Every structure is written in C-alpha cells, then in structure tokens.
Amino acid sequence: MPIVWLASYPKSGNTWVRSFIANYLMGTDRPVHINDITHFTFGEHQAEYYEHLSGKAFDTLTDDDINRLRPAVQRYIDRQRKEAVFVKTHSAVTELDGVPTILGEVTIGALYIIRNPLAVCVSYAHHMGVDYDTAVVALGSPETQLATHGRFAFQVLGGWSDHVVSWVDQKKALMGITRYEDLSRRPEEAFTKVVRALKMPVDKARLRQAIKNANFKTLRSMENKSGFIEASKKAERFFRKGKVGDWRTELNADQIARIVADHRTMMCRFGYLDSKGTPVDGGPAKDVL
C-alpha cells in the first residue's frame, strides 16, 4: 500500500510523533522502546533498504549511488505491507540531479510536523554540534542537507521556509499540519487531531496511554539507559530539553532578527509572529490542525 509520510525539518518533533503513533498502534500500558519504533514507522533513509537493493555494503555506497537508489527504496517500502505504511522523512519535496526526493506515485498522504524555527535553530545546533550562528545560516540555506552518517542515508533539507512550503503546499497529499507547540501545550487535543488526520479511529483511553508512554521524560529515560539508534554522534543526547520557548534565553537579538528576516512569511502563516511582527510560540494559524 502507498506511503503516508511523517515529514518535518530536523528537530521539530518527528521522533515524538512517531513514538506516539507506535504506542497508539500497540495499545499497551508498557511503552514501546524508542529503538523499536521503526517496527511501526519506517525510515526511508535506513541503510538496510539501500543494501538490499544495491547488493552492496552501505558504507561502500556514494551519495550519488544513494540518490539514484532512493526512488527504488521508496517503491520497495511501498510493497512491504497491505495497509498504508507510515514513513519518516526529513527530506523536502524537491529533486536532486533530476531525481525526486519524494515519489508521488507511492504517496497516499502526509502529516507535516512544524516547529518554531527559532526553537529549531537551538535544537539543530546542539544536534549537529555547531554554534547558533552556523545553525542560523543552515536554516536559511537552499543547500542544507543531513549528511550520510552511520546507518542512515543523506537527506535533502534546503532552508526551513522552503522545506515547509514544499510539504504544506502538497494539497493533494497533505492530511494535516501539526505544531510542536500544540503537542506540548495541549497534548490530548493535538494528538487527537493527529489520529483523526491519519484516519485512525479515536480511542480516548488508548490515546491518553500513548501520550503518557511517549512523553519526553520517558523517551529521555530510555535514551539514558540504552541509547538511541538515531542519535547524532555530535550531540551529548538526542532528547535534550523538549521545552517550548527556550530560544528566548539561548539566542541573541541578532540571531533572532536574522531568523525572522529569513522566514517571516512562513512564521506569520503558522503563528510564530504576532500582528506586530514579534516572535511568539504558536499563535492563531488557520492552516494547522
């Protein structure tokens, strides 16, 4: 069956949403371990797909090889289950050297997870082991990629605004847009909307248990005890703070101004700037769930 993409810019809450979905599908009191969520939500950047289709060890493949294989990987994932398949991606909907990053022919839908770019900047910097000024530039550059590392293929990001536009304007496939801030502040309401958008039946008791099983403290505790296979080697931990608004004490005025200048249109559209142009953490926005 076709793919339902769980798409986001890095450090926007994708892993959190995937953990929730895994726990909701499992429906038990015991939390699904973070290193087992790939049994419920695939990742199109996982090395085993590229090895299976190429017949080569992943570390022998060049980025050109990976780019050429990506459509075949997505078709392969599409064939794995009879029902719709949830697949994580950080790639923008674009092309690289004439090869699409996201295949329309295998896509049945997409949930886009969005987060204030000011907060993304802080979290991205820690994840990548760079300073905030470097992260500001990365979020504004059309050339930004997540490099191939370990057992994961590179992904084409571009700048934050371009990434957002590439997904949210996919009117045919888009099932909904959920904000990190809403998931954090109003979890039951926001995750209920996620479940409905993904066309799953809403079971309130199951939903509350899944929210509990996938809360930040639980995920961080799992990482502390046994590590997280998707963690960056450049960062001390994957689950760092998870707070809304910590950019206010992390970024200086110049860094905030540069991010706003680069992303004003999308920040306004999704409630990250108020009517006076002042940064906020999730004001009114008609396009979100």
Image: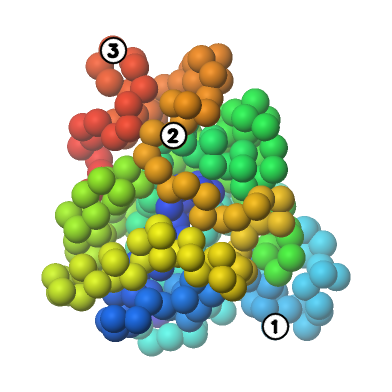
Report if the CB atoms under discs 1 and 3 are less than 8 Å apart.
no
Report if the CB atoms under discs 1 and 2 are less than 8 Å apart.
no
Q: Label 3 is placed on what type of residue?
A: Lys
Residue 232 can be seen in this image: yes
Counting from the top left corner in percent of width and height, residue 137 is at 64, 28
Counting from the top left corner in percent of width and height, residue 157 is at 59, 45
Counting from the top left corner in percent of width and height, residue 128 is at 67, 45
Report crowding for label 3: few under 14, some 14 to 19, many 20 or more residues within 10 A (C-alpha): few
Looking at the rendered structure, the secondary structure element under dot 3 is loop
**Which residue is rendered at x = 65% and y = 77% of the image?**
49
Name the N-terminal-most of marks 1 and 3. Answer: 1
Relative to 146, is 250 on the left or the right? left
Q: Which one is in front, 274 or 184?
A: 184
Report crowding for label 1: few under 14, some 14 to 19, many 20 or more residues within 10 A (C-alpha): few
Q: Label 2 is placed on what type of residue?
A: Asp
**Which residue is rendered at x = 20% and y = 75% of the image?**
206
Q: Which mark is residue 276?
A: 3
Name the N-terminal-most of marks 1 and 2. Answer: 1
Q: Which mark is residue 161?
A: none
Looking at the rendered structure, the secondary structure element under dot 1 is helix
Image height of 93 relative to 261, above or below: below
Image height of 194 relative to 213, above or below: above
Residue beneath disc 1 = 52
Residue beneath disc 2 = 246
Relative to 264, is 134 on the left or the right? right
Relative to 83, is 195 on the left or the right? left
Report crowding for label 2: few under 14, some 14 to 19, many 20 or more residues within 10 A (C-alpha): some
Counting from the top left corner in percent of width and height, residue 14 is at 44, 57
**Which residue is rendered at x = 40% and y = 58% of the image?**
216
